[in-house]
């Protein structure tokens, strides 16, 4: 997929972010990455942490994460094999609190507060829909844009009406707004608020420190620095980091420290007022 009418490095940026999302969105991948936080684990130890996976489901997922360069398989002896994060995989974890922060503010509120892992998975589902990243990129860059113009930039050479199914989905998900049929499209407040997430994914995918996310040419907000959020465990199925990661002196982010074997959840404070108005991102 190529976008036209945008800076020449935009295609590569979108492609890298789309690939990063594709690595972590498949079901259970984020939970397995979190389960591997800490020392390298034997297969049986990983299986104990993700005990809800049925026999035969864990191995192919570990293999996929190894092939993606996020997990490293180390064979000490034929009977002693461990799995742990690669440096690349560990560097990706600090993006997850940014996704939770966005989800808490912009996803529809459930009847009961959801664990952070479920908020991450819900958010990733929205962001990995086909053409979603490219459409959001174009609307962020160009502002209010008609469907035909969007099609020329997002899917050049194809029937321009093909842009409408993904556009309708993004409107239904609450990331894009429009006044009606035939009217131009624009980012919703929720779509625009994805800046820190996309900026961090872009920095990670390009091999840069996440501190560069605020300087992303499109999504960056150099004048804002989000405060770290505290993380706690509520003895749910998933491990919980003690706090959001902080950059080390060399500008890299250290990996989170997990308090126990449970996969993490976020202590979501009670939200005042009613749930998000109609048109907000759905789960």
Image (spheres, rainbow, N blue to C red):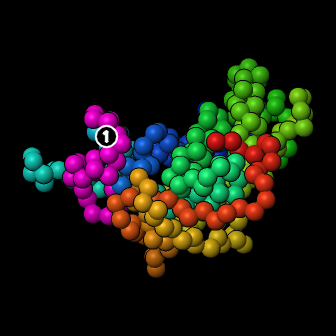
Give residue 128's quadrant in the image. top right
Where in the figure is residue 11, as x and y percent of width and height?
62, 42
Residue 82 relative to residue 173: left or right: left
Q: Residue furthest front?
A: 111
In the image, 89 versus 56, the foreground residue is 56
Please report the bounds of the magenta region as a residue range: 36-57
Give the residue displayed 85% in from the left and 44% down from the top: 144
Please state the horizontal and vertical placement of residue 46, each as a whole percent of the image: 28, 51
Compared with residue 208, is residue 64 higher up or lower down, i.e. above or below? above
Q: Nearer the viewer, residue 67 or 117?
A: 117
Residue shown at the point (29%, 56%) measured from the top left: 84
Task: Write down the residue under mark 1.
Answer: 58
Q: Is residue 108 visible?
A: yes
Instruction: Please say whether residue 99 is visible from this viewpoint.
Output: no
User: Residue 129: which quarter of the image?
Assistant: top right
Q: Is residue 45 magenta?
A: yes
User: Percent position (x, y) of residue 191?
Assistant: 73, 49
Q: Relative to 249, does residue 152 appear above or below in the rendering? A: above
- Report the quarter where the N terminus lies: top right
Q: Name the residue located 27 percent from the left edge and 35 percent from the top edge.
A: 55
Does 261 lie within the magenta span? Answer: no
Q: Residues within 10 Å of mark 1 (few under 14, many from 20)?
A: some
Task: Decide which of 202, 96 is in the foreground and name it.
Answer: 96
Q: Position of residue 120 (x, y in %)?
A: 55, 51
In the picture, the quarter occupied by the C terminus is top right
């Amino acid at each position: 997929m190529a976008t036209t009418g945008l800076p020449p490095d935009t295609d590569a940026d979108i492609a890298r972010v789309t690939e990063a999302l594709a690595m972590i969105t498949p079901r259970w991948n984020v939970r397995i990455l979190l389960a591997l936080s800490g020392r390298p684990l034997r297969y049986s130890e990983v299986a104990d942490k993700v005990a809800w996976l049925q026999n035969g489901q864990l191995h192919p997922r570990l293999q996929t994460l190894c092939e993606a360069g996020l997990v490293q398989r180390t064979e000490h002896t034929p009977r002693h094999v461990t799995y742990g994060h690669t440096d690349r995989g560990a560097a990706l974890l600090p993006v997850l609190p940014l996704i939770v922060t966005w989800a808490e503010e912009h996803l529809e509120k459930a009847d009961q507060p959801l664990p952070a892992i479920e908020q991450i998975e819900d958010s990733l589902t929205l962001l990995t829909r086909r053409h979603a990243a490219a459409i959001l990129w174009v609307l962020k860059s160009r502002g209010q844009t008609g469907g035909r113009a969007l099609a020329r930039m997002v899917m050049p050479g194809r029937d321009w009406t093909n842009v409408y199914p993904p556009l309708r989905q993004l409107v239904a998900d609450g990331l894009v707004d429009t006044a009606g049929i035939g009217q131009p499209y624009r980012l919703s407040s929720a779509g625009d608020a994805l800046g820190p997430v996309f900026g961090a994914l872009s920095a990670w995918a390009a091999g840069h420190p996440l501190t560069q996310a605020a300087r992303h040419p499109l999504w960056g907000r150099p004048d804002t620095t989000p405060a770290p959020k505290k993380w706690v465990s509520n003895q749910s199925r998933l491990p919980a980091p003690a706090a959001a990661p902080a950059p080390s002196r060399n500008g890299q982010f250290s990996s989170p420290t997990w308090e126990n074997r449970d996969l993490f959840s976020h202590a979501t404070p009670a939200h005042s007022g009613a749930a998000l108005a109609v048109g907000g991102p759905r789960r």
